[in-house]
Image (cartoon, helix red, strand yellow):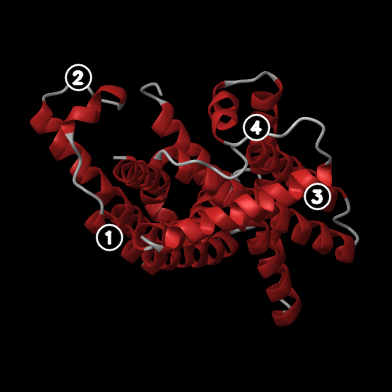
Amino acid sequence: MNILFLPTLSVLLFWCAACAALPFLVLRDRRLARIRKRSLFDKSADQISGLCVIMMLLLAAAVGADVWFHGRMDAVASSLSRPVWLLFAGGECLAAFFVLCSRILGRRRSFAIAGTFLAGAAAALSYLMFLILLWCLLRGEQAPGGMGVPPGADALSILKGLVGQFRDWVFRFRADWTLPALAAGFFCFLAPSAAQTSALLWHLVRRGSDDFGRDYYTFAVGGRARRAAWSGALLLPFAAVLLWVTPPFAAGKAGILPFGNLAPEIMTLLYNMLPLGLPLAVLCCYLPGRSASPLRRKSLIFLAPFMFFTGLFAILVRIWG
């Protein structure tokens, strides 16, 4: 594990969580456009659909290249569980294929909705696979499928063995379920919060290209900022309890973390204050949502993803420590 491994995991976790929830945001806006007969929701769905295509294609390309060229993540995941890692990579590639098909078949509404739903389902399942690998990596545990594949085994026997290992892996948490349950709640609410934050930033990025008028962006940015703030607020209790039950940061492990050359007292203070990035990210989304002119608070909106990433990185450090 090198000095950039945990920050890279934080970015990958945020990206994968956003991809798992973005297709369902598109379906929500399409449904509201049909029910309320307002084209504003269709415009928002078109923008978020473009973001979904870009993020999923980039993630699938990055993961596929890492698997093909046996990169850093492939080497680490292969030492934990090769089948689960391949399920994650295959799920992301499948989700990217479905979302690209839904984008191409956008004029046929039923095909587009079906493709978006299938992309969201595949991305959600691959997100679950990634969470299993991430948890086992942070806690130093044996992942399901890490026992290897017996020679001459067929696909059905491999699948049955993997299902049995998953069952045993889940049953092991019965003795001490507090930390896994809190982490499961945190990662569950992470997906909508990351998706809403990414969509909020994307509305501002596309403002210069998609000239939908000031009224649309006031409506879209204000509503998206409120939903990002509320989804982030649901994330905060789980983060607070996770910080409560995990031990404080120990400066002895700072050698493989960023800013490891600082004094131990400064390192301890810094890494115990980094979790404040999560409530600051919620505040950066809340203030534009409460403003009558949310476009005037663009600096807060651009700052929110960086605060979110900082707090997420701190949570991963505490779980790992």
Q: Which mark is residue 98?
A: 3
In the image, residue 100 lies at what x, y percent? 80, 45
Q: What's the amino acid at mark 2?
A: Asn
Q: Are marks 3 and 2 in contact (CB under 8 Å)?
A: no
SS at circle 2: loop
**Residue located beneath label 4 in the image:** 63
- How far, Cα to Cα, is label 3 from label 2? 46 Å
**Residue located beneath label 1 in the image:** 240
Q: Earlier in the sequence, mark 2 or mark 4?
A: 4
**Residue located beneath label 2 in the image:** 261
Q: Residue at x 64, y 20 (%)?
A: 70
Q: What's the amino acid at mark 1?
A: Ala
Q: Earlier in the sequence, mark 3 or mark 2?
A: 3
Q: Residue at x 31, y 43 (%)?
A: 314
Q: What's the amino acid at mark 4?
A: Val
In the image, residue 233 lies at what x, y percent? 37, 66
